[in-house]
């Protein structure tokens, strides 16, 4: 099997050449081309030089081989990989496709980095045993496991052990994945049983812990829903009770008639009695419903008033707390004389002492007039004044943050960064400089999958990569939608371009200059 890559405007295609000629009339080919199978790459047939070829859409996707060339497989990565295999096998079973035509080579398995979905190639005519292919895939994964992730090691070797069994079956892989999910659920259950977590999981206690007047958005909806359920149950029992009472009354009336205590009624009297009973029942139901609605409305209005009162009280308390925090952040309010004393002028201090003495004298005058002094308040005020004086002295004695530091000449940034291989924006200040310090640098706009992030909408999630090998730097496009060009020439899908000093590199509309 031979592969090549082709770019068409803003699409990238993988072209697979099989050893067998393609039979376009076969069931497998017609099902592949005529249906959209989620886990299989979108495929179309195209003739070239008398040969029918399969074109697989790989735009904005990266092969597993290139994506994990420098990265390790963690637990979540293994779930995506093995879960994708299980899903594609089940989908092929639904469409009655031959699983032997599935290609399980890492370089032909493409991952959507944002959706975390694996897309597989399905090549009719090239049949290989699924068990052998899957075992080779697990052997490819094992040396690339993240051994610091114990769960990833357990899952990887568990699936590998299943792949070596003679009775290999898809259910075995599902068991390993489901056991992993079961362990997660058990861990969550253990966490819930920890001290203090039961209270957090108890809705009644959560409702009691809610500040008065600060109810969540769905609080009233839940209460209203509960009232609806109770109302429905009460209505159901009310209808049932009414039916029982009517049936009992009719039976009693029939018994009295049959025993001769009452004359036998005619058809008109019977119909009139039934209509009167129905009308009476409807009227009673209407009156009871109106009374219930009135009572419910009064309770709702009472509850609303309580909530509004609690909310108003809560807002008032919150306002007071904010004012206190603001005063604490801004510090004590100092008068002009106190501020002068803070910076060395003792006139403010003398005036403060005079004011204190005057206050004491004034307090003495009030005592003489017959008012009883509050000793606790006076002692507290005196302590506060002494504390304020100590704080002023400490602040005045503190040196400035920059005191004693000696600064040399200003360092030029260009001299610090000189000698580093980088990509510099052609419009100064528009884009951040990309420093190529690693052996492999992935460039794109998806932060958790790229080493250098370019926040532009025209740049793909994983756009390109630059590899350092023997002191040289090679640029490769990673099936980006808008492509990567060097000096105005668009790179092909599998092309490795050797970058030269001052090459102009464009990642879509992000324009850089390579400086070596």
Image: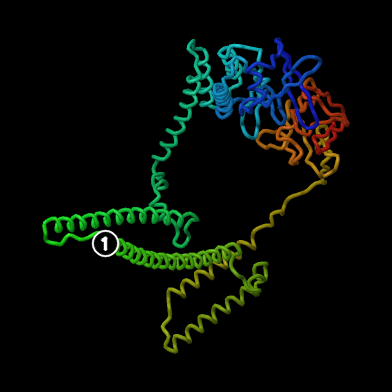
- Classify 10 Å Cα crowding around label 1: few (below 14), some (14-19), many (20 and above): few
Quarter of the picture containing the N terminus is top right
Tell me if 22 is positioned left or right of 198 in this view.
right
- Coloring basis for residues: rainbow
Viewport quadrant of the C terminus: top right
User: Which residue is nearer to you in this view: 499 or 18?
Assistant: 18
The image quarter containing residue 310 is bottom left
Residue 461 versus residue 217 in the image, above or below: above
Can you see residue 301?
A: yes
Label 1, secondary structure: give it: helix
Q: Residue at x 78, y 48 (%)?
A: 407
242 or 181: nearer the viewer = 242
Residue 387's x, y, as percent? 53, 66
Q: Nearer the viewer, residue 304 or 291?
A: 291
Q: Residue at x 48, y 65 (%)?
A: 311
Q: Is 212 left or right of 45, judged from the image as shown?
A: left
Q: Within the image, what quadrant is residue 31 found in?
A: top right
In the current view of this chain or complex, which residue is farthest to the bottom? 369
Q: Position of residue 190 (x, y in %)?
A: 41, 36
Vertical side of 235 occupied by 324: above or below: below
Hey, which quadrant is residue 480 in on the image? top right
Q: Is residue 214 above or below residue 407?
A: below
What residue sits right under mark 1 in the picture?
268
Q: Position of residue 14 (x, y in %)?
A: 73, 22
Any part of residue 502 in sight: no
């Amino acid at each position: 099997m031979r592969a090549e890559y082709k770019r068409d405007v803003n699409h990238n295609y993988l072209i697979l050449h099989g050893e067998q000629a393609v039979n376009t009339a076969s069931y497998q080919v017609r099902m592949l081309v005529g249906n959209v199978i989620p886990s299989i790459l979108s495929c179309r047939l195209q003739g070239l030089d008398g040969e029918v070829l399969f074109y697989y859409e790989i735009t904005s996707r990266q092969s597993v081989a290139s994506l994990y060339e420098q990265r390790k497989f963690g637990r979540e990565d293994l779930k995506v990989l093995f879960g994708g295999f299980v899903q594609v096998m089940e989908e092929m079973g639904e469409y009655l496709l031959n699983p032997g035509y599935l290609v399980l080579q890492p370089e032909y398995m493409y991952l959507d980095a944002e959706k975390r979905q694996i897309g597989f190639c399905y090549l009719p005519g090239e049949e290989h045993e699924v068990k052998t292919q899957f075992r080779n895939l697990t052997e490819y994964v094992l040396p690339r496991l993240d051994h610091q992730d114990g769960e990833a090691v357990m899952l990887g070797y568990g699936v590998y052990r299943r792949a070596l069994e003679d009775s290999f079956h898809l259910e075995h892989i599902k068991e390993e994945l489901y056991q992993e999910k079961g362990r997660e659920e058990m861990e969550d259950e253990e966490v819930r049983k920890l001290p203090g977590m039961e209270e957090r999981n108890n809705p009644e206690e959560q409702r009691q812990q809610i500040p008065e007047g600060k109810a969540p958005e769905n609080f009233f909806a839940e209460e209203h829903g509960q009232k609806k359920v109770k109302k429905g149950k009460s209505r159901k029992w009310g209808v049932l009770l009414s039916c029982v009472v009517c049936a009992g009354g009719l039976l009693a009336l029939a018994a009295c008639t049959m025993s001769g205590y009452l004359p036998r009624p005619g058809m008109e009297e019977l119909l009139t009695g039934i209509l009167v009973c129905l009308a009476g029942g409807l009227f009673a139901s209407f009156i009871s419903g109106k009374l219930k609605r009135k009572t419910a409305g009064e309770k709702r209005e009472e509850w609303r008033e309580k909530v509004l009162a609690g909310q108003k009280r809560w807002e008032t308390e919150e306002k007071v707390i904010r004012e206190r925090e603001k005063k604490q952040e801004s510090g004590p309010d100092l008068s002009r004389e106190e501020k002068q004393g803070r910076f060395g002028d003792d006139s403010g201090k003398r005036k403060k002492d005079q004011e204190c003495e005057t206050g004491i004298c004034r307090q003495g005058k009030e005592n003489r007039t017959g008012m009883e002094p509050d000793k606790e308040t006076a002692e507290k005020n005196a302590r506060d004044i002494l504390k304020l004086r100590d704080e002023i002295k400490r602040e005045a004695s503190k040196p400035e943050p920059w005191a004693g530091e000696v600064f040399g000449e200003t360092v030029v940034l260009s001299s610090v960064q000189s000698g580093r291989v980088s990509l510099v924006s052609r419009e100064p200040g528009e884009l951040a400089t990309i420093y190529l310090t690693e052996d492999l640098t992935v460039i794109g706009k998806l932060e958790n999958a790229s080493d250098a992030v370019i926040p532009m909408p025209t740049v793909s999630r994983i756009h390109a990569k630059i590899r350092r090998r023997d002191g040289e730097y090679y640029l490769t496009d990673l099936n980006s939608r808008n492509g990567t060009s060097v000096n105005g020439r668009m790179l092909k899908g599998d092309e490795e371009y050797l970058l030269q000093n001052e090459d102009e590199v464009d990642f879509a509309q992000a324009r850089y200059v390579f400086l070596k």
